Image (cartoon, rainbow, N blue to C red):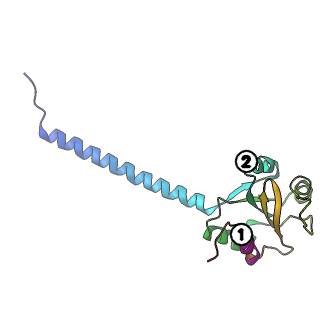
């Protein structure tokens, strides 16, 4: 004789499934939100050793170079986040090796056909196309001028005119 399973057991099974699925969805949404916030708050940072590989993989890119602490970059950082450019810009901190960085960039990425008045790239934003510097903003002050950065980004199509 076949044993009949009570309807009550089916209801308990359905309730357990619904609760399990609900908890899974809530945890997944929470994780995605947290991950998205972490990703959006920062842009990529590379060092001098990784520069060749990065430019080989990304021959057309923007590089922000600084030899100052990140607290001094807050205006630019906020601007990059506002314009959602964190995936387009890579950051290089040259605080410990400024002379080596300047020499390396001048030898390997400096387009000799372009006129750049200095070989001090310690605080700059570079536009790299086909693996060479085609345009650059260089600051002698403690931070880059946001108007100059915006002009550069508009010129190369990273942002649109509002």
In this rendering, position of residue 136 left or right of residue 15? right
Q: Residues within 10 Å of mark 2 (few under 14, many from 20)?
A: few
Rendered location of residue 76, percent (x, y): 71, 71
Point out the image quarter for the N terminus: top left
Rendered location of residue 146, percent (x, y): 73, 76
In this rendering, position of residue 114 left or right of residue 78? right
Residue underneath mark 1: 153
Residue drawn 45% across and 56% down? Answer: 30
In primary-sequence order, the first of circles 2 and 1 is: 2
Rendered location of residue 71, percent (x, y): 72, 69
In the figure, 89 relative to 5: above or below? Answer: below
**Residue nearest the observer in this picture, 25 or 55:** 55
Q: Residues within 10 Å of mark 1 (few under 14, many from 20)?
A: some
Rendered location of residue 115, percent (x, y): 91, 67
In this rendering, position of residue 4 left or right of residue 26? left
Quadrant in the rendering for residue 144: bottom right
Element at label 1: helix
Quadrant in the rendering for residue 123: bottom right
Q: Is residue 152 magenta?
A: yes
Point out the image quarter for the C terminus: bottom right
3D distance between C-alphas at marks 2 and 1: 21 Å
Residue underneath mark 2: 57
Q: Specify the segment rendered in magenta.
A: 147-156
Label 2–label 1 contact, CB within 8 A: no
Q: Is residue 56 magenta?
A: no
């Amino acid at each position: 004789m076949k044993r009949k399973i009570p309807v009550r057991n089916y209801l308990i099974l359905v309730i357990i499934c619904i609760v399990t699925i609900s908890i899974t969805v809530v945890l997944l949404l929470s994780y995605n939100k947290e991950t998205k916030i972490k990703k959006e708050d920062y842009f990529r940072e590379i060092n001098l050793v990784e520069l060749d590989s990065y430019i080989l993989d990304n021959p057309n890119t923007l590089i922000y170079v600084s030899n100052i602490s990140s607290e001094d970059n807050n205006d630019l950082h906020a601007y990059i986040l506002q314009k959602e450019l964190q995936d387009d810009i890579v950051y290089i901190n040259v605080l410990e090796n400024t002379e080596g960085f300047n020499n390396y960039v001048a030898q390997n990425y400096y387009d000799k056909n372009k006129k750049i008045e200095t070989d001090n790239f310690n605080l700059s934003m570079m536009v790299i196309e086909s693996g060479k510097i085609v345009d650059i903003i260089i600051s002698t002050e403690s931070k880059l001028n946001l108007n100059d950065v915006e002009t550069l980004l508009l010129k190369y199509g990273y942002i649109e005119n509002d």
